[in-house]
Amino acid sequence: MKPNFLFISVDQQRFDCVGYSGRRPVKTPNIDRIAHEGIWFDQAYTPIPICCPARQSLVCGQRAERFGALWNYDQGIPVRSLEKEAYSWARELQRSGYHTAYVGAWHGSPEYTPLDFGYEHYVPTAELQARIEQEYPGIVYEHGFYGDKNPVPLEDSCTHRNAEEIIRYIDEFSKEEVPWHVKMDFVEPHLPCRPSEPFASMYKPEDIEKWAAFDDPLTNKPYIQRQQLYNWETQNLSWEACSRMVALYYGYISQVDDAVGRVLSYLEADRAAGPYYCAFHCGSWRHGRQQAYDRQALCYV
């Protein structure tokens, strides 16, 4: 019997913001379980710390410079992108008789979708969000990139609709007794962080320890590190304001973990789904040192 493959990706999550790491007070019991029962890679590195090229490398298994995608295709400056004729391990699985489905964030090509790289079914994040906007019109978020508590109930949140779609595909494929591979790709906890309750209130800003390097004046550091603060307009950001963001960030991570747990629970309960391998992948990071909140040139700090 061929094994099944569940591949879970999250966007802008620090490796140490998983409970298993023991580094930050983030509750992720379901992701921890994957680590406990499998292998924790503590020296795994991205081939390039930029969203689109890294995602394309994940599709084909090649370094980004091989196909010319060195920055995000939607940042204004034209750049090459992975062609649909390129090798794709998902396509190889499909040719081997696997059913395949992709749910969630893509951001891998300006022209092509997962359907061009070996996936039979694709439900983009935009479709999940459109359903939410239709059912809960008129929601206004006041704090922009700094994040807000989400009034959308947990069951109807984007994270849990993602889990719902993944379970639907696994159930459908299992009934056909055909091996499957599904990609569960979360846009979360990418900023702006907007967790639903109870996760929006799970962490208290006043309980979060101040980053050791938050007040670092960046003396003798490369110019670009100081410039990033001005790019993000965070040069005068206080720890009080920052800790509120971090609390929402932690809550978003725990919400993603809850959605992951729903899929794992389904797989445990439904023996028809068959044996499977599960991989969890943290894509890039968000909260860095000092008042900087994105990757780019700060990745080597």
Image (spheres, grey):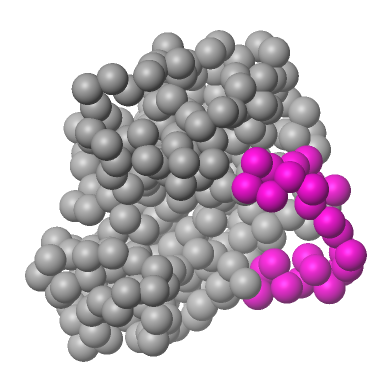
Residue 145 x %, y %: 63, 47
Q: Is residue 69 above or below residue 282?
A: below
Residue 176 x %, y %: 50, 77
Answer with the quarter of the image where residue 64 lies: bottom left
Answer with the quarter of the image where residue 205 lies: top right
Residue 262 x %, y %: 63, 46
**Residue 149 within the segment the image draws in magenta:** yes
Q: Going by the image, does 283 lie left or right of 93? A: right
Q: Is residue 61 above or below residue 49?
A: below
Q: Is residue 49 above or below residue 217?
A: below
For the point 63% across and 32% down, the residue is 245
For the point 28% across and 20% down, the residue is 219
Residue 258 in sight? no
Answer with the quarter of the image where residue 215 lies: top left
Q: Which image quarter holds the N terminus?
A: bottom left
Q: Going by the image, does 193 lie left or right of 181? A: right
Q: Which image quarter holds the C terminus?
A: top left
Residue 267 x %, y %: 54, 51
Q: Going by the image, does 2 lie left or right of 150? A: left
**Residue 100 within the segment the image draws in magenta:** no
For the point 57% across and 47% down, the residue is 191
Magenta span: 127-151
User: Relative to the observer, which residue lies in front, 92 or 216?
Assistant: 216
User: Relative to the observer, which residue lies in front, 20 or 273?
Assistant: 20
Residue 181 in sight? yes
For the point 38% across and 19% down, the residue is 217
User: Relative to the observer, which residue lies in front, 257 or 188?
Assistant: 188
- Count of marks, rendered view: 0
